[in-house]
Amino acid sequence: MNESPRLQFVAVQSLLIILGFAIAAQVSPPDVYSQIVSTVVILVVTLPVSYWIAYRRD
């Protein structure tokens, strides 16, 4: 698979965000404050992980 790092970053980020929201929906209460906090946590965690996966050197 010879994708550009940018496409790989977007694909991994999209997958991790969907997975993060699915997990957060199961474990957090359904109020607005919890959803905002979980969204911030998901972005803070997934952005560096996606960057590391897409742009790591082999």
Image (spheres, grey):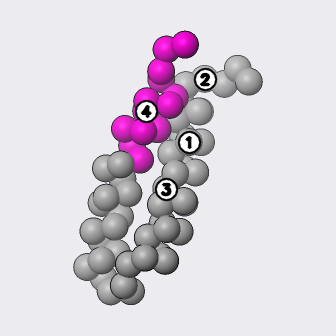
**Secondary element at tag 3:** helix
How far from the left and from the top, in percent, is residue 18? 54, 60
Which residue is under mark 3?
Answer: 17
- As shown in the figure, which amino acid type bears the numbered disc 2? Ser
Which residue is under mark 4?
Answer: 51
Lower sequence index among marks 3 and 4: 3
> Relative to 13, does residue 22 appear above or below in the rendering?
below
- As shown in the figure, which amino acid type bears the numbered disc 4? Tyr
> Relative to 58, does residue 27 appear above or below in the rendering?
below
The C terminus, quarter of image: top right
User: CA gap, disc 3 to disc 4?
Assistant: 13 Å
Q: Residues within 10 Å of mark 4 (few under 14, many from 20)?
A: some
* Label annotation for residue 4: 2
Lower sequence index among marks 1 and 2: 2
How far from the left and from the top, in percent, is residue 24? 43, 70
Furthest residue to the front? 27
How far from the left and from the top, in percent, is residue 44? 31, 50
Which residue is under mark 1?
Answer: 12
Lower sequence index among marks 4 and 1: 1
> Relative to 52, does residue 38 appear above or below in the rendering?
below
Front tag of 1 and 2: 1
User: CA gap, disc 4 to disc 2?
Assistant: 13 Å
Say whether marks 2 and 3 touch (CB < 8 Å). no
User: CA gap, disc 2 to disc 3?
Assistant: 20 Å
Front tag of 2 and 3: 3
Furthest residue to the right? 1
Q: Nearer the viewer, residue 26 or 18?
A: 26
Say whether marks 3 and 4 touch (CB < 8 Å). no
Residue extent of the magenta highlight: 46-58
- As shown in the figure, which amino acid type bears the numbered disc 3? Ile
**Secondary element at tag 4:** helix
Which residue: 27% across, 68% down?
37
